Image: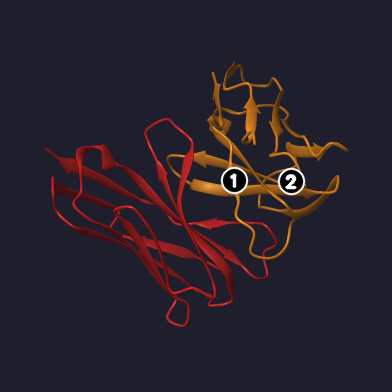
Chain colours: A orange, B red
Amino acid sequence: KAGVTQTPRYLIKTRGQQVTLSCSPISGHRSVSWYQQTPGQGLQFLFEYFSETQRNKGNFPGRFSGRQFSNSRSEMNVSTLELGDSALYLCASSPTNWGSYEQYFGPGTRLTVT
Amino acid sequence: KQEVTQIPAALSVPEGENLVLNCSFTDSAIYNLQWFRQDPGKGLTSLLLIQSSQREQTSGRLNASLDKSSGRSTLYIAASQPGDSATYLCAVKFETSGSRLTFGEGTQLTVNP
């Protein structure tokens, strides 16, 4: 079974631009969660999607948004990029959004904002 | 507030030593706890998953224990090797948080040859 894939792996953007990151979960998994990792804040939860609906949201500004498609693939979008958005963005998938299922992480997208 | 704390923040040991990394969490109502390894600039590699009903899990030289009632987990690494050098992260799935994992800040481990 293929693992979680994320594209692109690396991205360089300029302040003020917007960016879209993609995550394809493990086949059969319907829950996708997104995390941001920065040296100062560690790993922080952005949001989670299950069955095309956002089920849970972390404490991030509205510039961060996401969506999930009927095939469970998910995208996250960051508008009006700021220097502080430079981070490793990780997505994780699991079969469902409740219970004790393990989370499987992708390799991440490294975003650099200049 | 549900929090996860890891001690120590950094650890440097000579090759061959056995070592223990600690993780504590503030709410005992958890589904599970995962230990991850992260190499510099890379993603997360899952090491061990302990369900809330389990007391420990083992994989090779790694052993993780869980004491839910006291809100503690330990990761024991036997006979450490330079290749074990990485940051080790503890993540807890609380019962009231859906699929969200709450991560500790990590322990940066250096194993010296």
Can residue B85 be seen here? The reply is no
Q: Residue at x 59, y 76 (%)?
A: B29
- In the image, B112 versus A65, the foreground residue is B112
Output the chain of dot 1.
A
Where is residue A99 drawn, in percent x and y? 69, 65
- CA–CA distance between discs 1 and 2? 10 Å
**Mark 1–mark 2 CB contact (< 8 Å):** yes
Q: Amino acid at mark 1?
A: Tyr
| Residue drawn at point x = 54 percent, y = 76 percent | B53
Reply above or below: A24 against B50. above
Residue B52 is left or right of residue A58, and the answer is left
Q: Which residue is mark 2?
A: A29
- Marks 1 and 2: same chain? yes
Between A109 and B16, the one nearer to me in the picture: B16
Q: Residue at x 64, y 56 (%)?
A: B100
Kindly tell me whether residue B41 is visible in this rendering. yes
Residue assigned mark 1? A104
Answer with mark 1 or mark 2, whichever residue precedes in sequence: 2
- Label 2 lies in what chain? A
Amino acid type, label 2: His
Image location (x, y in percent) of residue A54: 81, 50
Residue at the far bottom: name it: B69
Estimate how packed mark 1 is, as few (under 14), some (14 to 19) or many (20 or more) residues with alpha carbons within 10 Å: many
Q: Residue B14: horizontal and vertical position, in percent?
A: 11, 46
- The dot on residue A61 is none
Quarter of the image with the N terminus of chain A in it = top right
Q: Is residue A66 left or right of residue A8?
A: right
Q: Secondary structure at mark 2?
A: loop
Q: Quadrant of residue A11?
A: top right
